[in-house]
Image: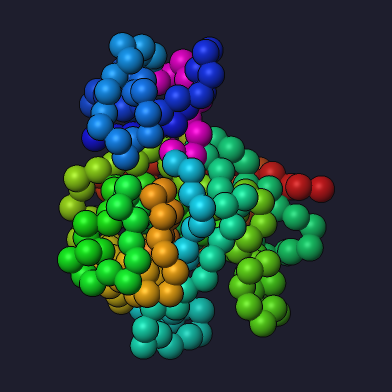
Amino acid sequence: MRFARFVHAGGVSFGVVEGDGSSGLTVAEIDSLPFNEVRFTGQRWALADVRLLAPIFSSKVIGIGRNYADHAKEMGNEVPKEPLIFIKPSTSVIGPGDAIRIPSVTSQVEEEAELAVVIGAAGARRVDRAGAEKAIFGYTCGNDVTARDLQRSDPQWTRAKGFDSFCPIGPWIVTGLDVSDVEVRCEVGQDPQNLEVRQIGRTKDMVFDIPTLISYVSHVMTLLPGDIILTGTPAGVSKIVPGDTVSVSVQGIGELRNPVVSLD
């Protein structure tokens, strides 16, 4: 199923996206969070008539650094011997169509296309691999936007990765998807109709697979329902500037598009 959070004439709701392809999709409202038993209210809208938001509330977003060997190499780093984790604040999260806002304190902001894991109702605390797999609710597209110059100059990564709007998520959460070998792609450009491919990778090339990541993180911090783990980015990260459109797509999930603007 595809779960979305959206704005409609009556307010904000969660719903299930129905239909095939990119046109003619509808969203059917449900009466609770998507973790619960799905009960439809009977209200439906054409997807084109609503505005999608980030698909879930998260207490925290956990990023994984250098989880693709080719990306570690392009950054001049070794592949880590265990998962390299960091946190992006919940205030950095935005949804589809929301603007990535570049502050004046940085001159080198880059995109990082990623598969994002959404933790389910049970959460995860000190789980093994089997427990990690049970903790997964679904998957979405993520963009770990990074001020690369600040990442290099600061002793830790919080500022570089924590600005408001530096974590686009969406367009929806897909459940029941096999993500062991799916394509992760990023396209960027000034013309939204003619974007340039910047990143292409496959999840099979992750250094640490998803159950390993969840188990590792859960031994550091309790993962709560709705928390997100960004699983790392493939090679090809590049500078984004005001006027760009950034498209992140994950095979089997969909496309996350965000414009880039100047904050100041």
Query: What is the basis of the colouring in this image?
Result: rainbow
Q: Position of residue 112 (x, y in %)?
A: 49, 60
Q: Which percent across, then down, holds residue 49? A: 46, 15
Q: Which residue is more in the foreground, 259 or 32?
A: 32
Front-most of residues 84 and 42 = 42
| Up/down of 261 relative to 155, above or below | above
Q: Is residue 204 left or right of residue 34?
A: left
The answer to which quarter of the image holds residue 208 is bottom left
Left or right, 38 with reference to 264: left
Q: Position of residue 182 (x, y in %)?
A: 24, 55
Numbered circles on residues, count: 0
Whether the magenta-drawn stretch holds residue 158 is answered as no
Q: Residue at position x 68%, y 67% from top?
A: 159
The magenta region covers 47-55
* Quarter occupied by residue 28: top left
Q: Nearer the viewer, residue 182 or 85?
A: 85
Verify whether residue 49 appears in magenta.
yes
Using the image, determine if residue 130 lies above or below residue 21. Answer: below
* Residue at 30% in and 36% down: 36
Residue at 43% across / 81% down in the picture?
73
Report the side of 27 relative to 166 (left or right): left
Task: Indicate whether 155 appears above or below 95.
Answer: below
Residue at 52% across, 47% down: 168
Q: Position of residue 132 (x, y in %)?
A: 25, 64
Is residue 46 at all visible to an observer of this figure? yes
